[in-house]
Image (cartoon, coloured by chain):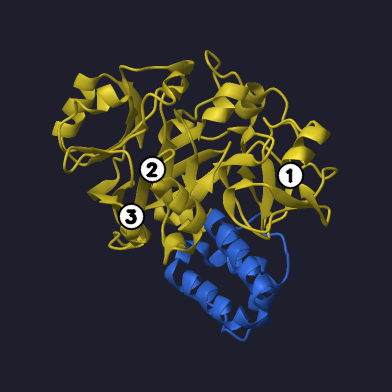
Chain colours: A yellow, B blue
């Protein structure tokens, strides 16, 4: 894969050449593009080789050179679970969903149960806006096949790969459970919680968070059979806690340990050839890690309102690499 | 070769909290969900084993993960 920040004119040229593209940019920039084999989502925060930056004019372009075919589809409403249907055998699927949309919450809560979800890599992100525009604008996704823009639904790009190639999807999460932290569980799945069980005792969760002085820049972390999966705090009110991803009923969470200086730790751990991988990182890591102007190694891409590696993630780097099928089989 | 559904490896994968850090991401997330579902409905074990076996039958890239169970 090839990644680059491009002007609207340069991106237009790529589309006209028939390239299969995944795009991230402002609504204004993406709205100017011609039809083609692409999907796009709004984002103005980027992690680039020269550092984190806000860019309203240029587009972050990922070209999937190993693609032999691609089909862009918008899935909305009751059709959303069908996003795992009609894929290319041995291919991969890219997905973009607008933040705060119905599709965002539906996918986050029910996505892990979609039929065949794990049968091929599903990678993407939750699209966003500049934080100064919250309440004034909405995140969008674009279907390049029809040239349409949507503020709800999932823009999906089913990609067929050259037979000798395979996609490998993984995450890099700098947060780990703090073994000394309380064990927290929730009775129901959702983006907010009023009550929780803490070390087996039921508590008013908002009061607990306030009384303990919990640093809500650190996520709750669950151990998914060895994969650390975060849920980030969005807000704390007197009545409830809101999250950027759903807490899942029955899952044991602990508050994360601080990873230290995020940009430095990230650069040290993000090893490998990020220049040839598709990746995205969380807007919260961008903000809390103060990444603007800082370089973080070779993994570049949009800073997003949620990351998708099969399921919705928070404060996590998602990376997708395409390489020879034999290498994937032994990886 | 995918072990038959009666093989003890499937019970170990779904019925215990065995760490699968070395497995592929898809396997970890799927197994984690299956474990939760079996915890809340123990009688569903056979269905969950069938679901996990079907996943490996379709996804050759992940079959190395079975050795971790």
* Residue at the bottom extreme, as displayed: B6
**Alpha carbon distance from label 1 to label 2:** 29 Å
Vertical order, A129 against A101 (above or below): above
Closest to the observer, A236 or A2: A236
Residue A258 location (% of width, % of height): 74, 31
* Residue at the front extreme, as displayed: A239
Q: Which residue is mark 1?
A: A205
Q: Which residue is mark 2?
A: A97
Residue A242 location (% of width, % of height): 60, 40
Q: Earlier in the sequence, mark 1 or mark 2?
A: 2
Q: Is residue A61 visible?
A: no
Callout 2: chain: A
Q: In front: mark 1 or mark 2?
A: 1
Dot 1: element:
helix
- Residue at point 68%, 47% (across, down): A194
Vertical order, A307 against A137 (above or below): below
Dot 3: element:
helix
Dot 2: element:
strand
Closest to the observer, A307 or A130: A130
Judged left or right of residue A44, residue A215 is right
CB under 8 Å between callouts 3 and 2?
Answer: no
Discs 1, 2: same chain: yes
Q: Quadrant of residue A297?
A: top right
Vertical order, A220 against A108 (above or below): above
- Residue at point 36%, 31% (across, down): A138
Q: Quadrant of residue A240?
A: top right
- Residue at point 43%, 70% (across, down): B58
Q: Earlier in the sequence, mark 3 or mark 1?
A: 3
Judged left or right of residue A189, residue A12 is left
């Amino acid at each position: 894969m090839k990644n680059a920040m491009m002007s609207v004119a340069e991106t237009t040229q790529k589309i006209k050449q028939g390239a299969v593209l995944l795009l991230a940019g402002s609504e204004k920039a993406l709205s100017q593009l011609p039809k083609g084999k692409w999907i796009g989502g709004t984002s103005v925060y980027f992690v680039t080789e020269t550092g984190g930056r806000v860019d309203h004019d240029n587009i972050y372009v990922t070209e999937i050179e190993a693609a032999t075919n691609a089909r862009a589809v918008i899935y909305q409403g009751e059709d959303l679970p069908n996003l795992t249907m009609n894929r290319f055998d041995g291919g991969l699927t890219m997905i973009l969903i607008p933040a705060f949309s119905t599709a965002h919450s539906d996918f986050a809560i029910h996505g892990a149960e979609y039929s065949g979800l794990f049968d091929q890599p599903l990678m993407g992100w939750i699209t966003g806006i500049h934080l100064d525009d919250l309440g004034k604008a909405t995140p969008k996704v674009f279907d390049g096949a029809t040239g349409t823009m949507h503020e709800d639904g999932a823009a999906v790009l089913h990609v067929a790969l050259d037979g000798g190639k395979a996609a490998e999807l993984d995450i890099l999460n700098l947060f780990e459970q703090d073994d000394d932290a309380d064990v927290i569980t929730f009775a129901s799945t959702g983006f907010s919680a009023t009550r929780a069980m803490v070390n087996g005792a039921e508590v008013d969760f908002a009061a607990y968070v306030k009384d303990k002085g919990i640093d809500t820049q650190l996520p709750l972390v669950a151990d998914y059979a060895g994969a650390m999966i975060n849920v980030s705090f969005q807000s704390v009110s007197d009545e409830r806690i809101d999250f950027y991803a759903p807490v899942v009923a029955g899952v044991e969470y602990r508050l994360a340990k601080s990873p230290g200086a995020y940009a430095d730790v990230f650069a040290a751990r993000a090893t490998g050839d990020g220049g040839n991988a598709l990746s995205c990182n969380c807007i919260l890591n961008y903000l809390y890690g103060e990444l603007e102007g800082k370089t973080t190694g070779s993994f570049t891409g949009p800073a997003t309102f949620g990351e998708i590696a099969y399921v919705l993630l928070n404060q996590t780097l998602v990376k997708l690499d395409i390489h020879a099928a034999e290498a994937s089989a032994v990886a | 070769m995918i072990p038959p559904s009666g093989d003890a490896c499937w019970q170990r994968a779904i019925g215990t909290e065995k760490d699968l850090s070395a497995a592929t991401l898809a396997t970890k997330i799927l197994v984690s969900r299956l474990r939760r579902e079996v915890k809340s409905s123990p009688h569903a074990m056979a269905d969950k084993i069938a679901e996990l076996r079907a996943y490996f039958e379709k996804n050759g890239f992940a079959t190395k993960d079975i050795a971790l169970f």
